[in-house]
Image (spheres, helix red, strand yellow):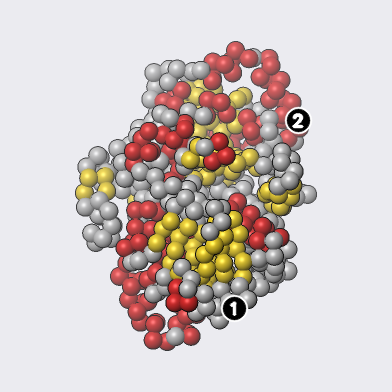
């Protein structure tokens, strides 16, 4: 911790700690380190979006999409690499903006995966307390609705012999009284007022009502009240270690900021690319060669069903409200997708096959043989009301690799690119996912569908990318240690999904939050060992505000 007092706010730096990114990981670090008396500056590349922005975005793609290269500065991002397509959120609150609000703990297989470095009592015990804190901070509650979409999913679960695993999903949503605004119900009045969920089905395109417990309404809200600064429209392009200790952060506009410590929490793509660039330009020369290795897609596949009944309306409820496990390693949730206009262009015939090339041929053959059916799907009346989407995830072993290489489009630039890992490639096809779609289609009366990027593109599509700057015992097998500190660069931390070395098998937001809580507790313990007088203060503020 020798660099903590150097280049900090008291020595001409902008803060003691700069946090890069304001999503799961960054928001938690901002609050907890501010509570510990650190001055904290959060840098977020996206905008601070309003409820009006989310309402307009449901009708206007220009307000929805994050494509800054062509001037679109919304909040929904989709980045497609050779082997994977990654969906995410950009703006103050990060991925929580486009998050469905699911708060699930993984099964034991995740915690015992051999990719984890060992800790004395195991990772389940290590994180138990922090899962409780994360659930409390994010306002976990059970979805109180069971609509037609949920009922058909229950039929699918029973047909699969897994009816006992079916149930309502724990959510980060203020359900309250529908449409009624009340004073803060979560933090003793210190948080913002909240409105009971109106069951609009549009969680994935931003909540314009203030019902979903996005990070700007809890962790970031409290952090700012305690003095943390959050700067939107501030994209970090490199980080450099200073000879005298501490770090210098360079922004896209050329501004340079200094701090004693830096927390990288820009999501897998942002954090890994930033570490690659900073290592290559000499700013962070000691970053491990394991950077970019062990990237996980949560072993995910996405399928859908378009109901035949043009008058059916399946949208009432939160985006996700029910789940089940068709087998020990596989998890399924249904999704409503109000505002998801782009799904018309991304869905096509359901095709089986683990061989991507053969599956591509079969999908193209199906499209060519029945083009009118595809057009009817794309231009279907009441498309969103009739659509059910399924996210299917596994905690099995597979991965891709990220590298920093020349762009195939602009070869004078180096960018993140993906590489397959022989024998362990992340799947673009899961037989369980196709089976769920077929069974649901039979139950409701409809057409089962695949994502075309999966069936034709051979890519794994995920909103839950993990790893790439994973924990290890040293630079030979990891990028960061079990305290999240980058090997070879004291005072530089990675606190987001990049740190997770294994497929979670369920939506990972609660796990990332719990790990960030653990990081902050470990950070406090180390500071307390150096400065014993601070221990009591931290214990009080943590208890009071958790």
Crowdedness near tag 2: few (<14), some (14–19) or many (≥20) residues, C-alpha within 10 Å:
some
Residue 420 in the image, given as x and y percentages of width and height: 74, 47
Relative to 504, 144 lies left or right: left
Relative to the observer, which residue lies in front, 185 or 69? 69
> Is residue 468 placed above or below 462 in the rendered structure?
below
Residue 465 in the image, given as x and y percentages of width and height: 59, 49
Query: In this view, which residue lies farthest toward the right?
Result: 422
Q: Residue at x 45, y 73 (%)?
A: 9
Say which label, 1 or 2, has the lower sequence index. Answer: 1
Crowdedness near tag 1: few (<14), some (14–19) or many (≥20) residues, C-alpha within 10 Å:
few
Relative to 20, 84 lies left or right: right
Query: In this view, which residue lies farthest toward the top?
Result: 372
Relative to the observer, which residue lies in front, 523 or 297? 523
Q: Residue at x 39, y 82 (%)?
A: 534
Where is mark 1, residue-wise?
244
Placement of the C terminus among the 4 image quadrants: bottom left
Where is mark 2, residue-wise?
358
């Amino acid at each position: 911790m020798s660099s903590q007092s150097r280049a900090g706010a008291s020595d001409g730096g902008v803060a003691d700690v700069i946090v890069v990114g304001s999503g799961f990981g960054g928001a938690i670090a901002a609050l907890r380190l501010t509570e510990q008396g650190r001055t904290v500056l959060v840098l977020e590349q996206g905008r601070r979006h309003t409820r009006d922005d989310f309402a307009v975005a449901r009708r206007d793609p220009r307000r929805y999409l994050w494509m800054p290269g062509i001037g679109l500065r919304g909040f929904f991002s989709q980045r497609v690499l050779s082997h994977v397509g990654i969906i995410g959120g950009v703006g103050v609150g990060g991925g929580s903006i486009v998050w469905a609000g699911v708060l699930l703990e993984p099964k034991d297989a995740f915690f015992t995966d051999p990719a984890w470095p060992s800790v004395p009592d195991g990772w389940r015990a290590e994180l138990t307390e922090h899962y409780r804190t994360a659930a409390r901070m994010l306002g976990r509650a059970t979805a109180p609705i069971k609509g037609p979409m949920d009922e058909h999913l229950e039929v699918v679960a029973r047909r699969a012999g897994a009816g006992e695993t079916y149930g309502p999903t724990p959510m980060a949503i203020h359900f309250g009284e529908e449409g009624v605004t009340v004073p803060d119900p979560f933090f003793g009045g210190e948080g913002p007022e909240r409105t009971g969920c109106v069951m609009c089905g549009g969680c994935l395109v931003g909540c314009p009502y203030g019902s979903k417990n996005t990070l700007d309404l809890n962790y970031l809200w409290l952090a700012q009240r305690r003095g943390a600064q959050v700067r939107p429209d501030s994209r970090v392009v490199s980080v450099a270690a200073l000879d005298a200790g501490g770090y210098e952060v360079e922004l896209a506009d050329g501004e340079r900021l200094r701090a004693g410590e830096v927390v990288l929490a820009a999501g897998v793509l942002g954090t890994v690319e930033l570490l690659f660039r900073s290592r290559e330009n000499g700013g962070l020369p000691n970053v491990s060669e394991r950077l970019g290795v062990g990237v996980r897609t949560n072993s995910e596949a996405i399928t859908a069903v378009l109901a035949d009944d043009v008058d059916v309306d399946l949208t009432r409820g939160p985006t996700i409200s029910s789940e089940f496990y068709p087998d020990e390693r596989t998890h399924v949730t249904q999704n409503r997708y109000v505002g998801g206009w782009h799904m018309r262009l991304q869905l096509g015939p359901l095709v089986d096959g683990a061989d991507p090339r053969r599956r591509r041929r079969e999908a193209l053959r199906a499209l060519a043989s029945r083009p009118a059916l595809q057009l009817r799907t794309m231009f279907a009346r009441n498309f969103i009301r009739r659509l059910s989407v399924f996210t299917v995830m596994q905690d099995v072993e597979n991965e891709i690799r990220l590298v920093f290489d020349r762009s195939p489009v602009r070869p004078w630039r180096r960018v993140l690119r993906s590489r397959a890992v022989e024998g362990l490639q992340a799947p673009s096809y899961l037989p369980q996912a196709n089976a769920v779609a077929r069974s649901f289609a039979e139950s409701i009366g409809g057409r089962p569908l695949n994502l075309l990027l999966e069936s034709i593109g051979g890519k794994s599509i995920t909103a839950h990318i993990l790893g790439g700057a994973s924990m290890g015992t040293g630079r030979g097998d990891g990028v960061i240690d079990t305290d999240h500190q980058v090997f070879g660069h004291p005072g530089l931390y990675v606190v987001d999904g990049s740190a997770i070395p294994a497929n979670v098998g369920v939506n990972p937001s609660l796990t990332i939050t719990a790990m960030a809580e653990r990081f902050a507790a470990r950070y406090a313990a180390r500071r307390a060992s150096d400065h014993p007088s601070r221990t009591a203060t931290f214990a009080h503020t943590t208890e009071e505000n958790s």
